[in-house]
Amino acid sequence: MSARGEFSSRIGFILAAAGSAVGLGNIWGFPTQVASNGGAAFVLVYIILAFALAYPVLMAELVIGRATRSNMVDALGEITGSKLGRLAGVWGFITVSLILAFYALVAGVMISFCLAPITHFLGFANLTNWLIADLASEQAISRNIVFCGLFIILTASIVSGGVKDGIERWSVRLMPALFVIILLLIFYVLSLDGAMEGLKHYVLPDFSKILNPDLLISAMGQAFFSMSLGVGTMLVYGSYISKNEKLSSLGASVALVDIGVAILAGLLIIPAMYVALHNGVQIFSENGEYIAGPGLIFAVLPAFFETMGVAGDFVAVAFFALMIIAAVTSSISMLEVPVAYVVESKGMGRKRSVWLIAISIYLLSCIIALNFNALFGLVIAITTEYSQPLLGLVLCIFTGWVWKRDKILTELKQGDADLEQGLFWKIWPWYIRFVCPVVIVVMFYRSVVN
C-alpha cells in the first residue's frame, strides 16, 4: 500500500465513489424532473445518457487519478506537462470548495429539520420553530450558521481519518444505511392513500414528451451533474484505487449505484407528494409545475409529515436522516479534493490540513449565510451551471487530445490485460475526444442562453 493511502477493497471504493455521486440533487431534483417529463420514458433516456455521457467523463477522472497517484492540481499538471493543467486543477479545487460552502448550509438545515420532530414531540415549541424557520428568513441566520458548523465538523472528522479509516470506513457504513432507510420509507409511503396515483405518474411512460429537445438536454445535465463530475472528487478517489482493479467495470458499478439511488428516490418522493396532495398539501406551484428543490424538502414534505400525526414525527426523522447521509457521503469527497492538494503539495499533516480547510470553508458558508438572498443563488449558479460543465469540458480535452494515448492504454491495461481487444477501448477514446466535448458545449450554451 502506498503511503498516501488506498481503498482496501473493491466494494469500499464503489460505495465511497457512489456516495460522492449520490447527493441531495438525486433525492430532490431527479424525482420531480421525472414526473414532469414523461415518467418512465424520462428514466429510460436518463439511464441511456448517464452511460453515454456521464460514464465516459467519470472514466476520464478515474484514469487520470490512478495513473498519476496524486491530487487534482499535480495530476492535471502531470498529464498536460504545463502550468495550464495546474491552473485547471486550482480552478477545480476552488470550485469544489465553493460548492461545499453552500452544500454545508443546506445539509445543516437537514440536521435541524431532523431534530425538529424530536423537540416537537418533547413540547419545546420555540426551539422547534427556530429549527424549522424558512431557509432564507432573518430568524434562520443563526440556525443556518450553527448547524452548518455541526455538519462541517462531522465531515472533517471523517476525512481526518484518511482514506481507509475515514472515507472508506464510513462510506461502507453510511451507504447501506441509506439504502435501508429509503426502502423502508418507500414501503411505508406506498401503503398510504394517494400513493398509487403518484406511482402511476412516476412509472407510466409518456413517450410524446421524449422528442422535446429541452427534455433531452435536461436529462443530459441531470446525468452529468448527478455523478459530481468535473470538480476532481472522482479523480482524487481514482488516485486511491489499487493498480490491480479493472477500472472500466469499477466506473460502471459507480454509475449503476448512482442511477439506482436516483430511481429509488423517485419511488419515494413522487408517491409521497401525491399522498401529501391527498392530505390537502399543495404540491404544484402557481405555473402548474411540481414544487422541486428546497421548496419540496423544506415546505411540501414537512407539511405532509404534519398531516400524519404522531407517525409523521418518526417518518420525518427517518427522511431527514436519509438526506443527511446523502449529504455527508458527498461532502467527504468534496473536502478530500483540497485536502489531498495541501497534504501532497504543501507537505502539511492530514489532520491539520483537514481542519484548516474545513474552517476556511465554514467561514465562506457564514459569509453566504449572512448575505443569503444575494449570495446563495449566485454561488450555486457560478459553480454548478458555469464552472462545473467547463471543468468537465477541460477534462475531456486533456484526456482526449493532450494526454498521450499509449500512456492511457498502459494505465488501463494494468488491471485489465485484454482491454485493447474489448469494446470499451474501441469506443471510449474517440467518445471522450469528440462526442463528450460537443454535448457539454451544447448543454453549457443552453444554460447560458436560458
Image (spheres, helix red, strand yellow):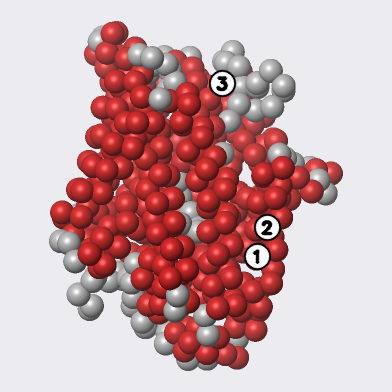
The residue carrying mark 1 is 437
Secondary element at image label 1 = helix
Place of residue 397 in the rendered image (x, y in percent of width and height, measured from the top left): 58, 70
Secondary element at image label 2 = helix
The residue carrying mark 2 is 441
Place of residue 48 in the rendered image (x, y in percent of width and height, measured from the top left): 67, 60
Residue placed at 37% from the left, 83% from the top?
244
Please tell me which of labels 3 and 2 falls first in the chain.
Answer: 3
Q: Nearer the viewer, residue 297 or 77?
A: 77
Q: Is residue 342 above or below residue 285?
A: below
How far apart in space, not on screen, are marks 1 and 3 (Cα)? 42 Å
Secondary element at image label 3 = helix
Which amino acid, by three-letter code, is at mark 3?
Answer: Ala
Q: Is residue 7 above or below residue 372?
A: below
Please tell me which of labels 1 and 3 falls first in the chain.
Answer: 3
Circles 2, 1 touching at the beta carbon (< 8 Å): yes
How far apart in space, not on screen, are marks 3 and 2 (Cα)? 39 Å
The residue carrying mark 3 is 276
Which amino acid, by three-letter code, is at mark 1?
Answer: Pro
Which amino acid, by three-letter code, is at mark 2?
Answer: Val
Quadrant in the picture for residue 67: bottom left
Place of residue 28 in the rendered image (x, y in percent of width and height, measured from the top left): 52, 36
How far apart in space, not on screen, are marks 2 and 1 (Cα)? 6 Å
Q: Is residue 105 above or below residue 391?
A: above
Quadrant in the picture for residue 170: bottom left
Residue sitting at the far front: 83
Residue placed at 33% from the left, 37% from the top?
364
Query: In front: mark 1 or mark 3?
Result: 1
